[in-house]
Amino acid sequence: MKTRVVPVIVTLLMLFISNTGISGTIPSIKSWPRVYDVQIEQKAAHIILQWKAENEPKEIYYEIESSADGKTFQTFAIVLGGFSEDAHYKYKARMKQAATTKTFYRIKQINNDGTYRIVSEQSL
């Protein structure tokens, strides 16, 4: 009985991965909202990322990721809905970390169907 369950679990897992954007799927929304004015700075023991976006649908959210080597990234924040200002949205993420070595940061814009795109990658 156990041998029949494993193929089903593997099949479901592969289906989940192929539909979540983990593999970097092509965006399924017609037009991604424009992200601009991305800023990153260190203030005392905090790293602060700020950015703005235009005309965002409710399905969009952001993941903020960091990496020591610029290749392997880990999520340190998920940012939902910004502050609206005349069809423009302001976002801010703050992380307690003293940058002792060069660290890479990126902002990933994600649609709720799992598709995504990298909108900014910077180092500090």
Image: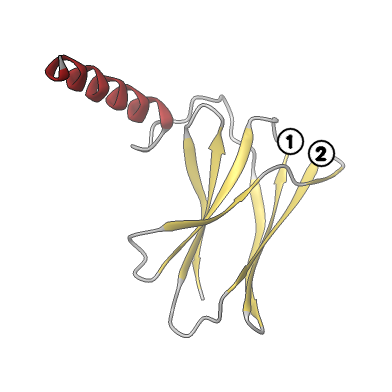
On the rendered structure, is 39 left or right of 17?
right
Q: Nearer the viewer, residue 71 or 16?
A: 16
Q: Nearer the viewer, residue 1 or 60?
A: 1
On the rendered structure, is 112 left or right of 9?
right
Q: Helix, strand or loop at disc 1?
A: loop
On the rendered structure, is 2 left or right of 79?
left
Tell me the residue at 87%/41% (across/down).
86
Find residue 1 and report its image quarter: top left
Q: Nearer the viewer, residue 37 or 103?
A: 103
- Vertical side of 54 occupied by 18: above or below: above
Q: Amino acid at mark 1?
A: Asn
**Mark number displayed over residue 55:** 1
Tell me the residue at 55%/25% (across/down).
29
Tell me the residue at 63%/81% (across/down).
45
Give the x, y percent position of residue 27: 47, 30
Q: Helix, strand or loop at disc 2?
A: loop
Answer yes or no: do the residues labelled 1 and 2 have beta carbons within 8 Å? Answer: yes
What is the C-alpha distance between the residues marked 1 and 2?
A: 5 Å
Reading the image, the residue beneath label 2 is: 87
Give the x, y percent position of residue 67: 41, 66
Q: Amino acid at mark 2?
A: Ala
Give the x, y percent position of residue 105: 50, 64
**Mark number displayed over residue 115:** none
Pointer 2: residues within 10 angstroms few (<14), some, or many (20+)?
Answer: few
Which residue in the rendered view is the most extreme toward the front? 1
Which residue in the rendered view is the most extreme toward the right? 86
Pointer 1: residues within 10 angstroms few (<14), some, or many (20+)?
Answer: some
Which sits earlier in the primary sequence, circle 1 or circle 2? Answer: 1
